[in-house]
């Protein structure tokens, strides 16, 4: 069940919270009378305000949220919490709302205030958080599937969507702002959710989005270049991930120690960690071995301490998918859910997970013609993992199409191009979200990287719709086309406009035109 156009999932029967009590509890100054005012929700986005909300007028990089107070009021906000500058702006605009004024940046209070209003501070389901550069979404979906198998009622927050039972909404950010997260948790409590899987971005850790949440188990899978536009250098990006492994945020951790970064997390973590190795000979508590793999999925055996073991499979290709599954299984084990309990709910260990837009097949599984997959990978690390996996299971040629984000980490583009062309037979470079950059300039960087690999045939076709058809026209039976980037998304962002574009719909349409799909 989709929740219509809602931007967040909220509790249906919230308990009113006195504004005066909130002011006292957080030592906030007030403007206007607080007498008898209650709030039933919290929002820092004026477009997402519901009747009864406390609207947080937050100063941001681009705007001051207080400038949107009129919209919040029109949508039924009962009060606003902001900083001194925000209160002044609202005063000048004549906004008739009681205002709480915070000396600290309102973001620093958001988690605690939201937890108080939504009363999530005493909600204690099993809380599991996943961080790393690639594979967080995949692990979270596998976790939700395993929770279900173990007889638990799962809740989920990912880049693709937020989910409570049959209520689903598309996600805006990978990790929601704290106000959205606590509203979601409050709804999960109403729906008797007893285990929650949350994708944790580095931005979430440094930007207070997880405040008021304590994880039973957090996991780290891998680390490679991304988000340097925001973090400046790899070390700062890594430090944001490491900060999740502290007692304030989590009780215990699970770490994939195949890489030097994983080993560092295990060494520098301030909470006890359990280690998973997927490479032969690596020192660890758990070991994963791949037993079979095809384009249709991967089978594996996982072995842990005291004879713990699990034999199973995931219906998505790639060794890394088995690694994602192993990580999810160990997280649950560490959260007190025995592997046997999970296995009891599965048929011969098969985890029937569907991960929207991650190596999602657009052709019929097992079909004789070319196979077409759409993926969300947009980092050098994910390109490397996918192409290595395809190299092991693709029966024919690999045709790889992709673009790159505009206005985001530009330093990864050449590397993306190089890795793509080193691992594929043909690469088609098209546009993704150019945003404010000239699309041809982004393509030029990708092309330079691709040509430096001196391996694949390199083709430039900016229009993704044409590129999809071109890829299909080049493919023969046994070949695999992989379109990396857009995954589950439904738009292309070009020069400030969000234009409707679903790669999955586009590919299905083109496959039908070519007679390759019914
Ligand atoms: C760098 C960053 O994280 N910025 C986030 C931050 O922006 P900001 O503080 O600068 O806010 P702003 O845009 O100036 O707006 C100021 C205030 O006005 C409010 N506002 C604004 C417009 C309006 O009509 N009404 C309204 O109320 C905003 O909600 C905000 O509170 O707060 C905004 C409100 O929540 C976020 O939308 C915005 O995310 C931007 C869009 C973003 O691109 N973030 C990315 C970098 C991000 O966080 N990515 C990670 C990782 C992704 C991955 O997995 O790879 C993620 O967790 O998603
Ligand atoms: N364990 C892994 N190691 C390397 N690459 C992976 C792994 N798991 C998935 N991938 C690749 O990375 C892509 C992104 O996966 P996923 O969406 O699960 O990661 P993510 O960390 O959630 O990324 P984002 O935060 O950008 O959503 C996948 O579509 C797949 O191509």
Image (cartoon, rainbow, N blue to C red):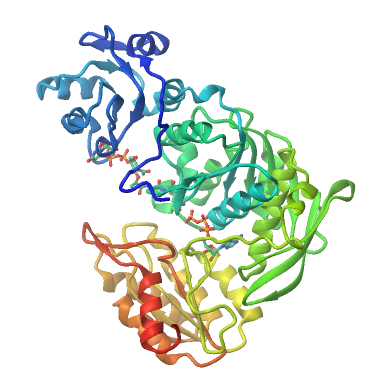
Residue 174 location (% of width, % of height): 45, 48
Q: Residue at x 18, y 32 (%)?
A: 67
Q: Is 47 placed above or below 399 here? A: above
Q: Quadrant of residue 33?
A: top left
Residue 459 location (% of width, % of height): 38, 85
Task: Please indicate, yes or no, whether residue 210 appears anywhere in the rendered image.
Answer: no
Outermost right residue: 306
Q: Residue at x 64, y 52 (%)?
A: 261
Residue 267 location (% of width, % of height): 71, 42
Q: Is 164 placed above or below 311 here? A: above
Q: Residue at x 40, y 70 (%)?
A: 504
* Ligand 2 quadrant in view: bottom right
Q: Nearer the viewer, residue 396 or 102?
A: 396
The quadrant of the image that shows the C terminus is bottom left
**Number of numbered labels in the structure image:** 0
Left or right: residue 295 compared with residue 176: right
Residue 309 location (% of width, % of height): 83, 54
Task: Please indicate, yes or no, whether residue 238 appears anywhere in the rendered image.
Answer: yes
Left or right: residue 241 compared with residue 301: left
Q: Nearer the viewer, residue 178 or 3?
A: 3
Q: Nearer the viewer, residue 110 or 513?
A: 513
Q: Quadrant of residue 505?
A: bottom left
Left or right: residue 141 compared with residue 187: right
Q: Is 78 placed above or below 457 here? A: above
Q: Is 126 placed above or below 380 here? A: above
């Amino acid at each position: 069940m989709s929740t219509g156009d809602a931007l967040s999932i909220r509790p249906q029967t919230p308990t009113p919270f006195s504004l005066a009590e909130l002011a006292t509890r957080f030592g906030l100054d007030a403007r206007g009378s607080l007498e008898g005012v209650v709030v039933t929700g919290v929002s820092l986005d004026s477009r997402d305000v519901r009747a009864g909300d406390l609207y947080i007028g937050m100063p941001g990089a681009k705007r001051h949220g207080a400038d949107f107070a009129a919209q919040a009021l029109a949508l039924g906000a009962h009060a606003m919490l902001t900083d001194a500058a925000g209160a002044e702006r609202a005063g000048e605009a004549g906004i008739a709302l009681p205002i709480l004024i915070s000396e600290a940046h309102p973001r620093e209070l958001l988690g605690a205030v939201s937890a108080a209003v939504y009363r999530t501070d005493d909600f204690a389901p099993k809380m599991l958080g996943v961080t790393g550069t690639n594979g967080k979404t995949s692990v979270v979906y596998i976790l939700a599937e395993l929770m279900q198998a173990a007889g638990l009622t799962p809740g989920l927050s990912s880049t693709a969507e937020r989910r409570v039972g049959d209520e689903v909404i598309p996600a805006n950010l990978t990790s929601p702002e704290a106000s959205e997260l606590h509203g979601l948790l409050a709804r999960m409590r109403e729906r008797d959710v007893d285990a929650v899987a949350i994708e944790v971005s580095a931005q979430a850790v440094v930007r207070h989005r997880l405040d008021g949440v304590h994880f039973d188990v957090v996991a780290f899978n891998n680390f490679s270049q991304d988000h340097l536009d925001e973090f400046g250098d790899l070390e700062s990006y890594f430090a944001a991930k490491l900060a999740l492994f502290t007692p304030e945020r989590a009780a215990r951790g699970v770490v994939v120690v195949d890489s030097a970064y994983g080993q560092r997390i295990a060494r520098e973590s301030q909470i006890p960690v359990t280690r998973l190795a997927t490479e032969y000979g690596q020192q660890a508590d758990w070991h994963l071995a791949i037993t079979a793999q095809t384009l249709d999925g991967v089978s594996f055996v996982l072995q842990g301490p005291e004879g713990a073991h699990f034999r199973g499979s995931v219906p998505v290709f790639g060794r890394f998918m088995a690694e994602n599954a192993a990580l999810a299984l160990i997280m649950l084990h560490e959260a007190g859910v025995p592997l046997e309990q999970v296995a009891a709910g599965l048929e011969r260990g098969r985890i029937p997970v569907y991960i929207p837009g991650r190596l999602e097949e657009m052709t019929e599984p097992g079909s004789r013609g070319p196979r077409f997959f759409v993926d969300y990978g947009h980092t050098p690390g994910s390109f490397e993992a996918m192409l290595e996996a395809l190299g092991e299971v693709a029966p024919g040629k690999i045709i790889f199409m992709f673009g790159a984000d505009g206005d985001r980490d530009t330093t990864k583009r050449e590397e993306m191009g190089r890795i793509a062309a080193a691992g594929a037979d043909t690469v088609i470079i098209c546009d993704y979200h150019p945003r404010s950059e000239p699309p041809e300039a982004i393509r030029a960087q990708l092309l330079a990287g691709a040509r430096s690999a001196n391996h694949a045939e390199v083709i430039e076709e900016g229009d993704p719709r044409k590129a999809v058809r071109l890829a299909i026209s080049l493919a023969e039976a046994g070949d695999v086309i992989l379109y990396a980037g857009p995954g589950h998304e439904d738009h292309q962002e070009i020069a400030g406009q969000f234009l409707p574009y679903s790669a999955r719909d586009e590919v299905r349409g083109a496959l039908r035109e070519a007679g390759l799909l019914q």
